[in-house]
């Protein structure tokens, strides 16, 4: 699925400390935006929810972030390609820090909700810009390595900050908002990055002149990647929403038992994500997709048809192995499909589809859930995985048949 001829020749550079920091932290900060305050939502409701509709607004403190991320992803990609990656990233990091820590002093629920919208815009921007930096700076093998590290650090960061947020929340519901101060690390890193010619070059250069007019996005963007990202996003996040209910219904699992299952799945996913770079030295992007969709679909199938706690756990672990490569593989393959000056917009659109997949899919399958129970979510994931596995297998078979014909 790679097409390295589309990338500007000679575009590869080495990553300096600031570049590595951005790539590794961008995924962590994005994940943190959706998880840091979950444990204190009941406490926020107790103190700030005074009207009949305020309970819904409290839940939207998380939901609004996800919707804003779907807007921030393509917007930041457009700005990065037009005015430069560095100024866009610097602005997003400041907004992330200020909006994220607003819960330390805001006592108005509507005002806090607005701050969360800005946090979502900034969080998506930071992640998209980190991914764009990988594709603008590195060639395929190094690109795969850093995409895998980006995904792995995002998962590990979530596992690390979950208990910290819980402990801070025991003291005050405001204290978990301190974690968003991590955006200041990027601000300081960008301010202190070395000022020599290499550092001023792309991907950190500021554009002072408009880029030459080229073909419109309709003609150059690989639109099937939106469907690919949407499907991968739905297969990744639907189980995280449905499995807790399934375990409660089938095994009467306690909240702590459910958290152990989800944590174990995330830990497995982090480990597998770190292997993505080495794996791509041996396998193509299509082979990686074949493995990912096959394992994720198989895991969902096992979990959907298991009527014991241990069976569901086995299914979740298999599912986590498959989903670990979704994001890095999509973004690595995408980097070879577009030119150097199109990387930001391409990454933004693909991540927007990824972010939108969860809320839209939840709405679409809710009637099925009400009829058949929570287990239908895992069955849907299994069907999607099986379908995409067949699509990738056919795609690889057609590519293999075409090679002898081209040789003639």
Image (tube, grey):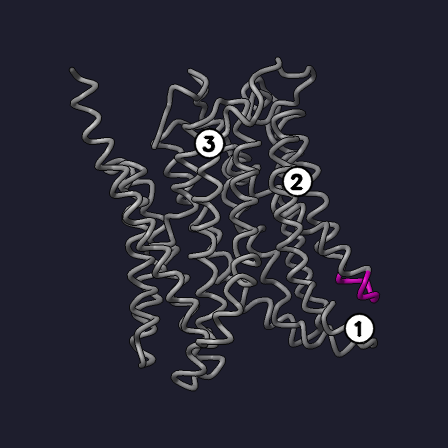
Q: Kindly identify the residue that appears in the image at 64 percent across and 61 percent down.
A: 63
Q: Nearer the viewer, mark 1 or mark 2?
A: 1
Quadrant housing the C terminus: top left
Question: How many residues crowd around disc 1 within 10 Å: few (fewer than 14), some, or many (20 or more)?
Answer: some
Alpha-carbon span between mark 2 and mark 3: 36 Å
> Regarding mark 3 in the picture, which secondary structure is present there?
loop
Q: What range is drawn magenta here?
A: 103-110
* Pick the front one: 153 or 310: 310
Residue 231 shown left or right of residue 398 in the figure: right
Q: Position of residue 249 (x, y in %)?
A: 44, 83
Alpha-carbon span between mark 1 and mark 2: 33 Å
Q: Position of residue 384 (x, y in %)?
A: 37, 55
> Regarding mark 2 in the picture, which secondary structure is present there?
helix
Q: Which residue is mark 2?
A: 188
Q: Nearer the viewer, mark 2 or mark 3?
A: 3
Toward the top, the furthest residue is: 212
* Pick the front one: 140 or 241: 241
Q: Is residue 373 above or below residue 384?
A: below
For marks 1 and 3 on the same chain, the one whose residue lies earlier in the sequence: 1
Residue 344 shown left or right of residue 115 in the figure: left
Quadrant housing the N terminus: top left
Q: Kindly identify the residue that appears in the image at 63 percent across and 31 percent down.
A: 78
Decide whether residue 105 is among the magenta residues: yes
Decide whether residue 94 is among the magenta residues: no
Q: Kindly identify the residue that appears in the image at 52 percent across and 36 percent down.
A: 347
Mark sitting on residue 222: 3
Q: Which residue is mark 1?
A: 48
Alpha-carbon span between mark 1 and mark 3: 45 Å
């Amino acid at each position: 699925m790679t097409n390295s001829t589309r990338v500007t020749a000679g575009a590869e550079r080495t990553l300096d400390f600031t570049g590595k920091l951005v790539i590794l932290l961008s995924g962590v900060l994005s994940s943190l935006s959706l998880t840091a305050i979950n444990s204190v939502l009941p406490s926020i409701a107790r103190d700030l929810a005074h009207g009949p509709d305020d309970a819904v607004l409290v839940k939207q403190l998380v939901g609004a972030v996800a919707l804003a991320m779907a807007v921030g992803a393509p917007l930041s990609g457009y700005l990065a390609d037009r005015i430069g990656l560095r100024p866009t990233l610097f602005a997003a990091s400041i907004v992330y820090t200020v909006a994220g820590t607003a819960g330390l002093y805001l006592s108005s629920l509507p005002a806090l909700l607005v701050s969360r919208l800005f946090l979502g815009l900034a969080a998506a921007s930071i992640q998209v810009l980190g991914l764009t930096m990988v594709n603008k700076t590195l060639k395929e093998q190094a690109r795969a390595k850093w995409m895998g590290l980006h995904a792995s650090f995002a998962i590990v960061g979530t596992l690390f900050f979950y208990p910290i947020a819980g402990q801070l929340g025991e003291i005050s519901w405001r204290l978990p908002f301190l974690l968003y101060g991590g955006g200041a690390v990027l601000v300081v890193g960008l301010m202190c990055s070395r000022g020599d010619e290499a550092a001023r070059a792309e991907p950190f250069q500021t554009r002072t002149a408009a880029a030459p007019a080229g073909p419109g996005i309709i003609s150059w963007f690989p639109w099937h990647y939106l469907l690919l990202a949407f499907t991968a996003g739905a297969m990744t996040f639907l189980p995280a929403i449905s499995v807790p209910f399934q375990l409660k219904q089938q095994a009467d699992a306690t909240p702590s038992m459910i958290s152990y299952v989800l944590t174990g799945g995330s830990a497995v996913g982090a480990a597998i994500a770190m292997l993505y770079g080495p794996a791509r030295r041996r396998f193509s992007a299509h082979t990686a997709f074949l493995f990912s969709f096959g394992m994720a679909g198989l895991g969902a199938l096992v979990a959907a048809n298991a009527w014991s706690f241990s069976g569901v756990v086995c299914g979740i672990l298999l599912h986590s192995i498959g989903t670990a490569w979704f994001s890095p593989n999509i973004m690595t393959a995408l980097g070879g499909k577009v030119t150097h000056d199109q990387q930001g917009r391409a990454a933004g659109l693909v991540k927007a589809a990824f972010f939108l997949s969860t809320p839209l899919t939840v709405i679409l399958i809710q009637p099925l859930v009400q009829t058949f129970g929570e287990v239908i979510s895992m069955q849907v994931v299994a069907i999607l995985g099986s379908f995409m596995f067949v699509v990738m297998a056919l795609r690889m078979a057609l590519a293999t048949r075409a090679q002898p014909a081209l040789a003639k």
